[in-house]
Image: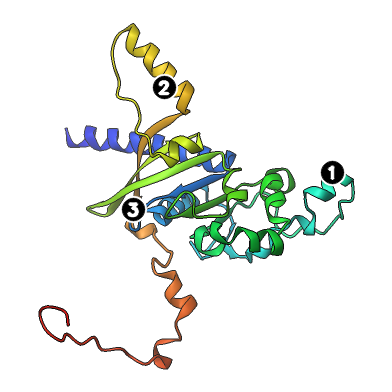
Amino acid sequence: MCFNRKAKDDARYSEEDAFLVDIFNNHKTETFGYQGTGKDLLTSHVIRLIGRPHYGNMCYDDNTVLFDLKDLNAGGNTYQDLINGTVNKFPRRFAEGWHKYISDCGIYLPSQYYKDLEELYPGMPVEFALHRQLYNSQIHINSQDIDRPWTKLTEQIDVYINTLSVRKQGEYLYVRYIYYTKYDSARRRLLPLPRTKGIGGDRDAAQFYATNGEISEHEIRAHMRDIEYDTRYFKNVFFLDEEGMQRYKPIRINRYGY
């Protein structure tokens, strides 16, 4: 009995892994969700499954090559160059077939500073749009909120993944998420339509998905030994090393907090 259940679980999560790998190999994705819902855990998991060298703005595993986001610039060419036929050719900056992962994209490329981004990095949206043709690879971003990253990038996303929760069971971590193919459905965090029986139910479901795109709930399973990334990456970006830091000792004044 236990063996059969394990075999079924293994088969189920193998299918889930194959589904996720197919998404990341063939589409630009945005993974979004509240703190602690498994955005980087899901990204780390799919990176391990794909098993190839890749670029990242943080280190996920030994196959990660760190890169600067400013290099996503299409050689400085913009839509005007494409229209006017004034494209300047440039040496390729990335290896063929290596995906790129941008964690916390809303911090690096925040939508509220879109005017500055348009002025300073006008070629980035062009690179984002043409990246598969240029390098035969995909760009993947994550953020706490779907609208926090620069709109000129997120409007080109193919698939949206809303992470819901992480749970620990034994040696495994499980991440629940909802998959969307339409931005508006992801932004509204629509739930998949419950299954209904009968002709009317099938018709309603067909209309629902025709209007809202594909929506489905999934769960992945990641072994804890496979987690190699720093879950508190930014402390190393902003803080001095521990020896150079002045240690702060919190003081409790009274039980009322003042």
User: Label 1 vs label 3: CA separation?
Assistant: 42 Å
Q: Which mark is residue 91?
A: none
User: Label 3 vs label 2: CA separation?
Assistant: 27 Å
The answer, for residue 18, to whether it is visible in the render is no
Sequence-first disc among 1 and 3: 3
Measuring from the top left, give residue 97's x and y in whole percent.
Answer: 66, 49
Crowd tier of the residue under label 1, counting other residues whose Cα lies within 10 Å: few below 14, some 14–19, many 20 or above: few
Of tags 1 and 3, the one toward the viewer is 1
The answer, for residue 31, to whether it is visible in the render is yes
What SS does tag 3 mark?
loop
Residue identified by numbered label 3: 37
Q: What residue type is labelled 3?
A: Thr
Give the answer, above or below, for where 178 lies relative to 229.
above
Measuring from the top left, give residue 38's x and y in whole percent.
Answer: 36, 53
Picture residue at 42% right of the left edge, 55% below the top: 144
What SS does tag 1 mark?
helix
Quarter of the figure that contains the C terminus:
bottom left
Q: Which mark is residue 208?
A: 2
